[in-house]
Amino acid sequence: MPVGINQPSNQIRLTNVSLVRLKKGSLYIHIDNPLTTPQRLILPSGKKRFEIACYKNKVLEYRSGIETDLDNVLQIPSVFLNVSKGQTAPAADLAKAFGATTATADIVLEILKKGELQVGEKERHAQLERVHNEVIDIVAGKLVDPKSKRVYTAGMIAKALEQLSGHRQEEGSGLGTPEDGPGKVKERPTWTGVVATKSAKSQALDAMRALIAWQPIPVARARMRLRVSCPVGILKQPAKVARGEGDEEGKGTVKERILSYVEEVESQGEVGGEWEVVGFVEPGAFKGLGEFVGGETKGKGRVEVLDMAVVHED
C-alpha cells in the first residue's frame, strides 16, 4: 500500500463546495375542531441551521435564472446540519422546522432560494474580478479623449481608476485638475474600488463620474448621435422656455435653441414639411433637449437616439 494515503476507501469527501445555510425553527400547526373555527398555532422553538452542498459559482447562476438544472447546482440532494462533518439533518428536525408534510426536495429548494450563501475566499476573489472586468469594459466603452474623441484601452482605464482609489481624492492630491475647478471638494464623486455587492452597471456610472470629476487622464463622456425632427412651421417661433436666467442661448427661435444643444451638426434639411437635423450631443444635454422639443412642439417633434456612444477607434 502506498505510503501517505490515509483516506478510507468508503469515505466520500465533498470538494469544490459552496454552502447555503438557512436558520429555521418555528413550527406551524393547524388544529381543526368542528366546534370552533380552524386555528393555526405557532409554537416557537430554538432555530436550527440547515445546510445544502452546492457546486461553486452555480448558486448565483440558479438564482439569476441562468442555470435551471438542479443536478448542476446540488452536489447531493440532501439537507445537512453540518456539511463539513457529513452530518445529515434528522427527519424529526426537518419536520419541526419545515412541516411534517414538506418533501425533502421542497426543503432543499427553500434553502437554495432563501438561504445565505457562504462564499469562500477564492470564489469571492473570482466574483470580484468578474465584476471588476465588467466595470472596466463598460467605462472603456463610454469615455473618450476629449480632443481626439478616441477610446482608451481597458488597461489605461484600469490604471486611472487605481490612481483614484490609491490616492486621497482632494485638492493637492496629485491628481489632474478637477473638472469644476477648485472648491466644492466634498461634493465631488469619489472612487474607492469595485465591490461585489453592487451591480457592475451602477459601479461603472460611479467610476465614470469620478474619472470625469478628477481627470487622472483627460476623459469625457462619448457623445450621443441624435436625430431631431420638428414641423417647419414651428421653427421660426420664439422659444417659450429659457435654458437659464441670463443665458443668451435661451433667447431665440425654436430652431436656434435646438441647434444650441447640438455640439456638431452632421446634416440638416427639410423633408415633407418637417425640418430634420442629425448631430452629436453631450449625454448630459439629452434630457434637456428632449424636454424642450416636447414642450415647444406639443408632442409634434421627435428626438431619436441613433448611437448611444460615438467613439473613434484606431
Image (cartoon, rainbow, N blue to C red):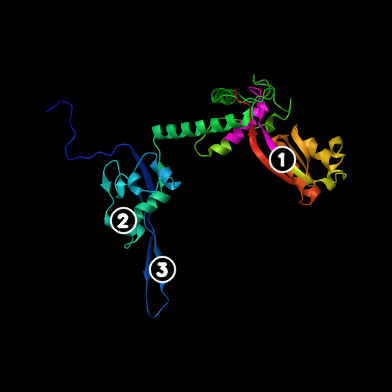
Q: Position of residue 17 (x, y in %)?
A: 33, 39
- The N terminus, quarter of image: top left
| SS at badge 2 | helix
Which numbered tag is attached to residue 40?
Answer: 3
Q: CA distance from mark 2 to mark 3?
A: 23 Å
Q: CA distance from mark 2 to mark 1?
A: 59 Å
Disc 3 marks a residue whose amino acid type is Arg
Few, some or many C-alpha atoms within 10 Å of disc 1 (few <14, some 14-19, many ≥20)? some
**Residue at far bottom of view:** 35
Q: Earlier in the sequence, mark 2 or mark 3?
A: 3
In the drawing, does residue 54 fall left or right of residue 136? left
Q: CA distance from mark 3 to mark 1?
A: 63 Å
Which numbered tag is attached to residue 227?
Answer: 1
**Residue at far top of view:** 174
Q: Between 34 and 163, which is closer to the camera in this rendering?
A: 163
State the residue at coordinates (50%, 31%): 133
Q: Quadrant of residue 241?
A: top right
Which numbered tag is attached to residue 283?
Answer: none
Q: Position of residue 250 (x, y in %)?
A: 85, 39
Q: Between 115 and 66, which is closer to the camera in this rendering?
A: 66
Few, some or many C-alpha atoms within 10 Å of disc 3 (few <14, some 14-19, many ≥20)? few
Camera-side mark, 2 or 3: 2
Q: Between 179 and 284, which is closer to the camera in this rendering?
A: 284
Q: Position of residue 5 (x, y in %)?
A: 18, 29
In the drawing, does residue 202 fall left or right of residue 233? left
Marks 3 and 1 in Cβ contact (< 8 Å): no
Disc 1 marks a residue whose amino acid type is Arg
Which numbered tag is attached to residue 104?
Answer: 2
Q: Quadrant of residue 246?
A: top right
| SS at badge 3 | strand
Q: Which contiguous range is marked in magenta?
A: 204-226
